[in-house]
Image (spheres, rainbow, N blue to C red):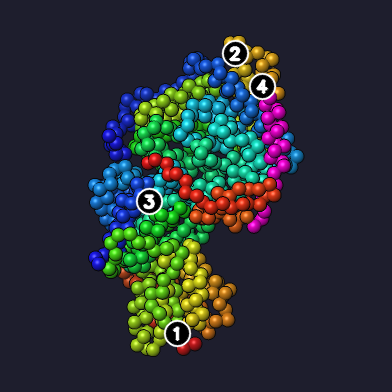
Amino acid sequence: MVRPFGADKPSGSESAMAKAKTIRSGTERTGIPPATLERMLYFLKLTREAESRIEQVLYRQGKIVGGVYVGRGQEAIGVGSALQLIEGDVVLPSHRDFSSFLIRGFSLADIIANWMARADTPTRGRDNTLHIGDLKLGVIPIISPLGGTCPVACGVGMVLKWRGQGNVVLVHLGEGTTSVGQVHEAMNMAGVMKLPVIFIVNNNGYAYSTPVEKQFPIKHLSARGPAYGMPGKTIDGNDVMIVYRAVGEAVARARRGEGPSFVECKTFRVTGHSAHDAAEYVPARLLRAWVKKDPIQRLEKHLLSKGIMTRESIGNLDRRIKSEIDAAVADAEARPLPQGESALQGVYCGPECWWKGRIQESGELEVTSNKEEPKPTV
Amino acid sequence: MPVLTYLEAIRQGIWEEMERDPSVFLLGEDIGILGGAFKVTAGMLEKFGAERVIDTPISESAIVGAAIGAALMGMRPVAEMQFMDFIACGFDQIVNMAAKMHYRWGPAVPIVIRGPSGAGVHGGPYHSQSNEMWFVHTPGLKVVMPATAYDAKGLIKSAIRDDNPVIFYEHKFLYRRIKEEVPEGDYVVPLGKAAVRREGNDVAIITYGAMVWTALEAAEQLEKDGISLEVVDLRTLLPYDEEAVLGSVRKCNKVILLHEDTRTGGMAGELAALIGERAFECLDGPIVRITAPDTPVPFSPPLEEYYLPNARKVIEAARKLAKY
């Protein structure tokens, strides 16, 4: 029987407050299959190296159009969470979650080509950086006014709940974004309607130049979870195994129909806000301390100590990743820029939908008709 | 044929679309148990159930954002703003998320945001606004404002079936004050097409919403003075029917642009520029605008009466323009 929204027993009570936990590092890393751990290392490294290629090589060569925002040092959040997703789940990543796109199946060449403003990309030159989406892959992108994806995630969650297939939606946001009003509207709505939405906060210490002490008056953002009728957890965001476990727990809750969760991942932004921000406002000793807690080094150390990988197999992985990136960059660089007049197309969706067309090698668009696609079952 | 009020026509249109298409659902404040502040959704909770008629918290950004998210998942949500004055609370979601999404990465965002707008009911600054131009100025949206009961039903159906985000303005002054024969069953009125409400030859008056009735009232009086007014009801403000506007201007050679919205940045300015660009040679007199002044909508009756355009102001302007 389907129950109306809001008719579920309210969980914003003392029992929910008692459930709010702060998990410290080292307690929930066990039991992950070696194959998954190897996948984690692959995606962490692919993300790190691809973003470095974009920010430290291509950008400096003038091959990137516009600004560059990377998530160096914060890769464990995207990797640990996206690996919990199954088909039918949806994720709304932040600009620091490059890995979420890769794990869901975006091609690296498409992502790099989008940075290069080429025509044959998921945005056809209309939007930059990681503002890319694909409903078939279950990825909905941010808009620059951050926080907007939280209400959208609620709408996705409503439909997933109706369909009753146990699917969930993850929405990523930074600690600075948690100050935005509509984030609170979304958390409140997710709580009162008991939606399968997992709010994942990347608390990397700084929102551009604004440190956490100027952003909010509390120490752990997880305190906000129970205020909106959901469990809240603060975890070590630089340990991919802990992220995987904590998000997995939240995802399992949501799949069982128990509603939303809030997971705060503590990490650090070891770069500037963007490629052109030297971030001189960050104290050097703070930066040095966090670089030592690098998520990739920590996982490598774990894999080596458990004998799951050797120095040789890691070396092979590094080489494989380098050649993947080389191939993706070459592919992206070969794509032409869009034609100027194409800026006028695709404002409205209609029977002659411009987006259904195919970009040819010349950069021209071959428009095909907007064939009726099978409607998803309600 | 049954006679329905403008409000009942909207209600019937929504009801029929809910029956026709299971992906249509409603969300908003007080729309379920209460049936809506104006009773537009009365009876729908009982008929369609709580999953399809959702009473939300007071969260316009979340209401619009959730509508967008549900639309991306294949649904066709109709979100209510209890008064269109409150649409400002969901502004970012409308202009930045919904409006630009198809252009940026291709998905359809088939949402309708509907609610009561307009003055004349002593509602004061926050229950009387005509804020349509915020959205007419935003590419990617469609903006609709019916003036008749027949159109209200046909246009809400078209809006719900449209694959783009549509902002649907219902003029609250017209809700129960106008009624006409409205066919039972399915019919649509297309978006983007104006309608000539009254044919004329001397002066064209381009308008929309409740002001259509003000123009018609003025036309009756002007007929006695031997001045024949052609009244054009835009119906859709974005995209608007350029050919209908230019056609009537070319026919009458004189034009009045009338709206309840304030003067600066209003639709009349946009139309005046279009007419100046494309029908300059046809004009036998200056383009005239009749609008509210550039103030918030005032509350006390003498203030509101002074503020609003009315038939007397239209008659005065038409007589002067006819003599030019």
Identify the subunit bearing mark 4: A
The answer to whether residue B192 is above or below residue A332 is below
Regarding mark 4 in the picture, which secondary structure is present there?
helix
In the image, what residue occupies the spot 54% across and 33% down? A104
Between circles 4 and 1, the one closer to the viewer is: 4
**In the rendered image, is residue A15 in sight?**
yes
Q: Are marks 3 and 1 in contact (CB under 8 Å)?
A: no
Residue B183: where, in percent of width, then height?
Answer: 29, 64
| C-alpha distance separating marks 2 and 1 | 88 Å
Q: Which residue is mark 1?
A: B202
Q: Earlier in the sequence, mark 4 or mark 2?
A: 2
The answer to whether residue B191 is above or below residue B268 is above
User: Magenta: predominant secondary structure element?
Assistant: helix
Magenta stretch bounds: A320-341
Q: Are marks 4 and 2 in contact (CB under 8 Å)?
A: no
Quarter assignment of residue B213: bottom left
Q: Amino acid type of disc 3?
A: Val
In the image, what residue occupies the spot 60% across and 10% down? A307
Q: Which residue is mark 4?
A: A317
Q: Which residue is mark 2?
A: A308
| C-alpha distance separating marks 3 and 2 | 53 Å
Residue B318: where, in percent of width, then height?
Answer: 43, 82
Residue A68: where, in percent of width, then height?
Answer: 65, 39
**In the rendered image, is residue A180 in sight?**
no
Q: Which labelled disc corresponds to residue B78?
A: 3
Regarding mark 3 in the picture, which secondary structure is present there?
strand
Q: Amino acid type of disc 2?
A: Ile
| C-alpha distance separating marks 3 and 1 | 41 Å
Q: Amino acid type of disc 4?
A: Leu
